[in-house]
Image: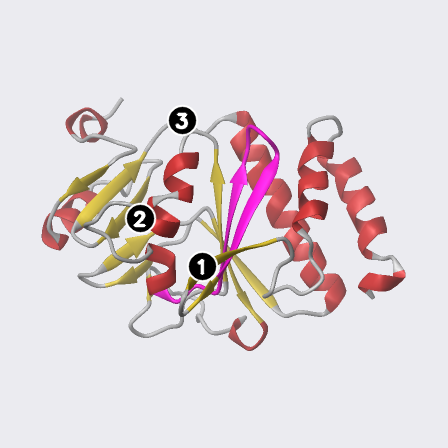
Amino acid sequence: MSDLQTQLPTNTWIYTSWEEYEQIVANLLNEKGKSYYYKGHMRLEMPPVSFDHGKDHVVIIFAVTLFATIKGILATGLDTTTFRKTGIQDCQPDVAYYLRERAQTIPAGTGIVNLDRYPAPDLVIEIAKTSLLDDLGTKRCLATSRFASTLYEELGVAEYWVIDVQNAQIIAYAMAEEGSKRIQESQVLPGLAMSILEEVLRRSREMNQSEVGAWLLSHFQQKEYC
């Protein structure tokens, strides 16, 4: 365990200034951790990544990318990328997608995605096993009186999914000016039902990923998807 992990609490929101947060994140460059900053509070997530978490991470990226490919939707997926509004907000979602005309918005060679310069991703996905309550709480809708709105809503993300690893379920929300609402079918990827993705997650518990991919490809190639 590193000195950083022993000195700072993880998996909880703590008060800190932006300047202190920047210094802490600079020390994370060689750590396998994620960091978030929102309304004067930061959160570090540095637990070991479980087998189930890692597997669902790969499966959901494959499923979304395959659907976009078959539907002819331009898509650029990002894995654990930092999105930042300097001095205000910072996040590193497990998965993010830019879609359609935004698919080539971010040029090659970009490091941290500056949201003062570039748009927020259309879709953000968090893979949650130990962080489920926070992924459904602070990152989507902070319940404490200190937080009036949500991190991803304020960043301008159109859609947010939480993958519940333990139960092979997906809790998906569409963001709107009046707040977020639960959805059963993606609005940024029309025709992609959460039930199909949940079936993919369930099958991945019993089949290898090549077999799951073959089943999903066959399903997506049915007439209603073409």
Residue 16 to residue 82: above or below: above
Marks 2/1: CA distance?
Answer: 12 Å
The residue tagged 2 is 142
Marks 3/2: CA distance?
Answer: 25 Å
Residue 92: tell me if it is visible.
Answer: no
For residue 48, which numbered disc appears in the image?
Answer: 3
Q: Quadrant of residue 45?
A: top left
First along the sequence among labels 3 and 2: 3
Amino acid found under the numbered disc labelled 2 = Leu
Per the rendered image, the range of residues in magenta is 155-174
The x, y position of residue 107, in whole percent, is 44, 71
The x, y position of residue 10, in whole percent, is 26, 31
Magenta highlight: main SS:
strand
Element class at badge 2: loop
Queried whether the magenta region covers residue 173, the answer comes back as yes
The x, y position of residue 84, in whole percent, is 29, 60
Queried whether the magenta region covers residue 190, the answer comes back as no
Amino acid found under the numbered disc labelled 3 = Pro
Q: Name which residue lies at 45% across and 59% down.
A: 180
Element class at badge 3: loop
Q: Quadrant of residue 148?
A: bottom left
Amino acid found under the numbered disc labelled 1 = Ser
Q: Name which residue lies at 30% across and 46% down.
A: 143
- Within-10-Å neighbours for mark 2: few <14, some 14–19, many 20+: some
